[in-house]
Amino acid sequence: MSQPKDFGFNEDISMLKETFAKFLTEKQPINMLRPSLEGTEDPYHGATRVGFFDKDTWQQMIQLGWHAVAVPEEQGGIGMGLVAATALAEEIGRFALPTPLSTTLQACFLLRELKSAGADQLLSQIATGESVGLAIYGQQGSLNTDSTDVMYEAGTLTGTSWYVTDAQKLDHFIVAANSENGIGLFKVSANQPGITLEPDRIVDLTRDQACLVFSGAQAETLCDPGHGEPSLKAALPALLTLIAADIAGAAEWQLQTTADYAKVRQQFDRPIGFFQAVKHPIVDMMIQTDATRSLVYNAACAFDFDKDDAPRCAHLAKSSASDTASLASQCSTQLHGGIGFTWEADIQVYHKRQIHSEFMFGDGTWQRSKLAELI
Amino acid sequence: MSETRLSNEQQEFQEFCRRWLAENRPGPTKTPLPQAAYEVVDEEHRIYLSEWQAKCYEAGLIATDLATEYGGHGHTGLQQIASAEVHRAKVPYFINWIGLGMTVPTLLAHGTEDQKKTFLPPIFTAEHIWCQGFSEPGAGSDLASLQTSAEKQGDHWIINGSKVWTSLGHFAQWMLLLARDDKQNKYGGITYFLAPMADPGITVKPIHKMTGESGFNEVFLDQVKIGDHLRVDEVGAGWKVAMSTLTSERGAGVGVGAVAGESPRLVMQQVINLAKDTIRNGKSVWDDPIWRDRLMKMYERTEAAIQNARRTRVKAINGGAMRIPLQGKVAGSEISQDLHHLALGILGLSSSLYTRDTHAADDGKWALGYMNTYTGTISGGSSEIQRNILGERVLGMPKTK
């Protein structure tokens, strides 16, 4: 199999990305997020944050079909691949959008690997506008695909899934659980008996996170026990690429916002962007962001067109993205000076989203250790 | 690595290039060639490399997509294939890299019909080697402060001054020359000429580099006489023309042929192999997780540069026509430098062994190569100047000047 030169970025996908970006430009997600944060600021006495997302925005996104981009046509979706999903993920990151879409896109690529009646059923539910996320980590947050603390026995789940991203926004979860025959993947729904959602207090303001505590929750089998781990492995390149795209989008916002600030902020009678001590680090943000973007498009294209090469390309993309998340955040806060350190500035919102994303599915060092095994 | 999708014509041409390069690979030289084209000083090497370049041109690997009236082969969409195959084949580099990489794009953009028809064909055959007369002792990063003067006398110009860091000056028949026609106008007082190196007023004196090699020169111009027909573009337009030459030098221009010898991906693979083959404390360097992380970070940067080049041509996601191309020189030269430094670290103390030491790994090429990477980060606008350009032209920040 070979990759197309244009990263598979055809006219349909360009249009999709453009339309989605225009939609989010009109929404200004951070302005919608801000009221939900009031009173929660104080880390010692502040009110607990709710997993905010704008439900009207989500309904409009469903009407426009963006929720079903990666659902196969047989299950009522649009049937596009990772190149298209990555285009959406990049814009989600650029606008720091709180949304059930990020995890739902992840779920689509995992479900597509399963090829079971249960998985197809859940894909059909996504096509009708229901949202899904992944509950696959144990407490250690080990990045291996066999780290779950949940047990499956006689049709029910017990134990706890940790670090479940955007749990408060979702209708269903795909749970990785140990069974007699190895790790299996199971479907549970948010409001069913036997499940308690315990929200985490997290740094990132644009996402929520929780523990899912299972006490004999009825679970529907999505794949045969023992097939959970290979399926997670097969979907991992997609998961890595989507989060790397989110980082690339957010880094582009950090870059443009910092460059714009350097043009207007005056010190020593000049805009600070005149000084090379300010100008050059901003250029380095651009060089790193562009490296990440190119590796992200390459990884998405590899997944759709050259799947054997997808793991290598995905580790490259997330390795670069993790380091870009760190560098772009550090520079954006530092070069904004005092104002960048305030709660009031949106710089902090992106910074906190980025250092959350940096470690999702493994940081740069982790990716490189996996990459070395493939070289 | 996967192939990108090619048309039938491109595929056929690719097969032709592979076959031709395999069948026509030149034999070894008596003494080894230097690592890069800008270090060539031996007459034996000049003849060998000029013949090789001419042969590649005859075969259609150079000027592949250029119009036939300028000596090109008149194809479309095949140059990038030829250049990629030349890289891949690990054949000797093209000696006339300034002619191919700078003179050609500059004349195509700014030259008269007559200049294009006269000067382009001998560049491809390497009959005319070109050098670049831009930098002066007092005009490096601040190139527009150059003082070499051009005075109009009838239908010709009289040039006086000196140039420095002139690669290939010792071989060249022609020079891309910047000279000042107006002392009162810093940027608007520069004119661009094609200068014949055979003029009796030109003296070339070699400079030795930190590596001990030569390859570049000081050039003194004393009452040099240049006909007005050798002026490029308008009087006073030299700065504008120079910027287009430098854009080509920095990897953002339209190519007519691959110039460099070894691709970054190939050098990266050599360094990974070096780590696997170098044993320290009973284990290979590759087996040390810290070294493996450093190597994989380097590998990530190399792959990113390759994917950046690919993205340049995808309009929907390239961020504007110049954004990625203008990063090419600074990113590429810094990757090369860090990569060579990594190789020195893998070798440890053995990296102190230089060329012709019988114990030196790869005949000292890593130490030599490391030092030579500073050519990339300094010449053609240093990395600091590149960052100014990127900040100003791409991100719109105020000019540092």
Image: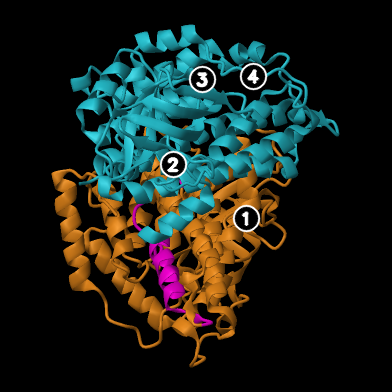
Chain colours: A cyan, B orange
Q: Which residue corresponds to mark 2? A: A148
In the image, A262 versus B54, the foreground residue is A262
Q: Are marks 3 and 1 in contact (CB under 8 Å)?
A: no
Do the residues at pointers 4 and 3 share their chain? yes
In the image, A8 versus B217, the foreground residue is A8
Do the residues at pointers 3 and 2 share their chain? yes
Q: Are marks 4 and 2 in contact (CB under 8 Å)?
A: no
Dot 2 falls on a residue whose secondary structure is loop
Give the amino acid at mark 2: Thr
Give the amino acid at mark 3: Gln
Q: Which residue corresponds to mark 3? A: A168
Q: Dot 2: few (<14), some (14–19), or many (≥20) neighbours within 10 Å?
A: many
Q: Which residue corresponds to mark 1? A: B382
Label 3, label 2: how far apart the Cα atoms are: 20 Å
Label 4, label 2: how far apart the Cα atoms are: 27 Å
- Please identify, in this view, whether the residue under mark 1 or under mark 2 is nearer the observer: 2
- Quarter of the image for residue A371 reads bottom left
In the image, A243 versus B222, the foreground residue is A243
Vertical placement of B94 versus A256: above or below? below
The residue under the point 68% across, 29% down is A348
Label 1, label 2: how far apart the Cα atoms are: 52 Å
Give the amino acid at mark 4: Arg
* Percent of width and height locating residue A72: 23, 24
Given the image, what chain letter belongs to the residue carrying mark 4?
A
* Percent of width and height locating residue A349: 64, 26
Q: Which residue corresponds to mark 4? A: A49
* Percent of width and height locating residue B74: 23, 47
- Please identify, in this view, whether the residue under mark 3 or under mark 2 is nearer the observer: 2
The residue under the point 57% across, 69% down is B341
Dot 4 falls on a residue whose secondary structure is loop
Q: Dot 3: few (<14), some (14–19), or many (≥20) neighbours within 10 Å?
A: many
The residue under the point 37% across, 61% down is A375
